Image (spheres, helix red, strand yellow):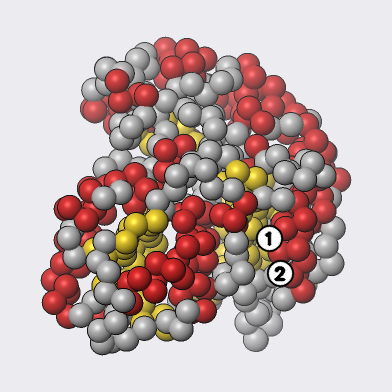
Amino acid sequence: MSAPSKTFYIETFGCQMNAHDSEKVIGTLEHEGYTRVEDEEAAGLILYNTCSIRDKAEQKVFHRLNEYKRMQGEGKQFAVLGCVAQQEGNKIFERAPYVSLVSGSASYRNLPAMLDRLEQGETRITGLDDHRTQDETFDTEFTTRSNPHRGYITIIEGCDKFCSYCVVPYTRGKERSRASDSIMTEAQRMAAQGYTDIQLLGQNVNSYRDPLGKQTFAQVLRSIGQLSGVRRVRFTTSHPRDFTPDIVQVIDELPTVCDHVHLPVQSGSSAVLKAMQREYTREWYLERIAWIKSAKRDISMTTDIIVGFPGETEDDFEQTMTMLDEVGYDAVYAFQYSQRPNTPAVGMPDTVPDEVKSARLQRLMDAQRERQRLSYERHLGQVMDVMVEGYNRQRGQVTGRSSQNKTVNFTTAQPILPALGSYLNVRVTRTFPNSLVGEAVQAG
């Protein structure tokens, strides 16, 4: 490879799964003798790990690649990875001919061979999922973890749900679950290395089906939560179709399994849910919410909502609005509907004007912010177990996260700042719609 030799820079966009994918890529590159640099100007190989979920994602990718174009005469090589790479394939070479490697996430196991070809001077190397990939997708032998205290384990890849608006089945392929023995081996290794917070990942994480037939998703949660040294087990993202009562039971019985469930509803209208091909109704979803609310622990609930899906009427939207109070979400991640390439909804007339979408989204977020203000007030005076994540020196505060995945900013009477990754008991003294403020009362 032309100078600068065997150095790389990686830029990552998207969800936690993309971030974890980049950890796998970084580990593989380092194993192959590459050195990571934090400045793209100093890199011989520039990798762009992409996400295609949001509106105009592919346009943003090509815009970013155009910015890289100025460096093409400097002996650098460029690679596009992830969902947009899988979605656009060879079109990337056509629109950005200075890109030498295009690879979807399921082909990262072949990255060493692709790097060899790159070093030999090949300029059009593809690693695209043929939708027949199996458990080797989960090879994490060379994973370099970015956080020494919190680590991710992908337990299921892909999606079989084919919601009409969603591009994931076309970029990540079919659902492929990792064997429970393999999951436990990695979790045990992480616990032995000092990871106290383990997060299980999947496009539909609770759709997990053990190829060995040994453990259900809830049993995997329990097994990891019982490992020595593990303080927290999280999971994201769940699908309502596969959410079962035993998940709530494990959260109730095992304090190490975090009291937080992210359960995307997308719409409060059964008619819109049917058009979205979500395979459940409003009533089905609320039944699962009832299971969560019946728990002995106070389980925090968060969700995703799409506003302005084709055919959404004002009544449909009002049904979504009523979900805010009926469920009592602690956070809502809401977005205006936008067409994604290759999805069934592309053929649906986009009947909701952009200005109506914007107005509905604003109404929803305003209502949710007020609801969160009231919801967070329930924590006033409570003592929470908080994991230290950073420091705000200007405010003289420590920043951490509760088991409900809520940000907690707090002060401590100790002159020495607590170590990153440590746990402290914090009494909540003030609340905001998106965070809590408190003071440490004793070490966790």
**Residue 337 in the image: x percent, y percent?**
34, 31
Q: Secondary structure at mark 1?
A: strand
Q: Are marks 1 and 2 in contact (CB under 8 Å)?
A: yes
Amino acid bearing label 2: Met
Report the side of 165 relative to 150 (left or right): left
Residue picked out by circle 2: 190
Residue 301 in sight here:
no
For the point 26% across and 61% down, the residue is 124
For the point 40% across and 29% down, the residue is 165
Q: Secondary structure at mark 2?
A: helix
For the point 24% across and 28% down, the residue is 354
Q: Is residue 373 above or below residue 257?
A: above
Q: Is residue 238 above or below residue 269?
A: below
- Residue 167, disc: none
**Residue 303 in the image: x percent, y percent?**
54, 37
**Residue 413 in the image: x percent, y percent?**
68, 79
CA separation in Å, label 1 and label 2 = 8 Å
Residue 157 in sight here:
yes
Using the rendered view, name the quadrant where residue 61 is placed: bottom left
**Residue 65 in the image: x percent, y percent?**
22, 61
Using the rendered view, name the quadrant where residue 213 is placed: top right
User: How many marks overall?
Assistant: 2
Q: Front-most of 157 and 60?
A: 157
Residue picked out by circle 1: 198
Amino acid bearing label 1: Ile
Quarter of the rendering occupied by the C terminus: bottom right
Q: Residues within 10 Å of mark 2 (few under 14, many from 20)?
A: many
Q: Front-most of 112 and 407?
A: 112
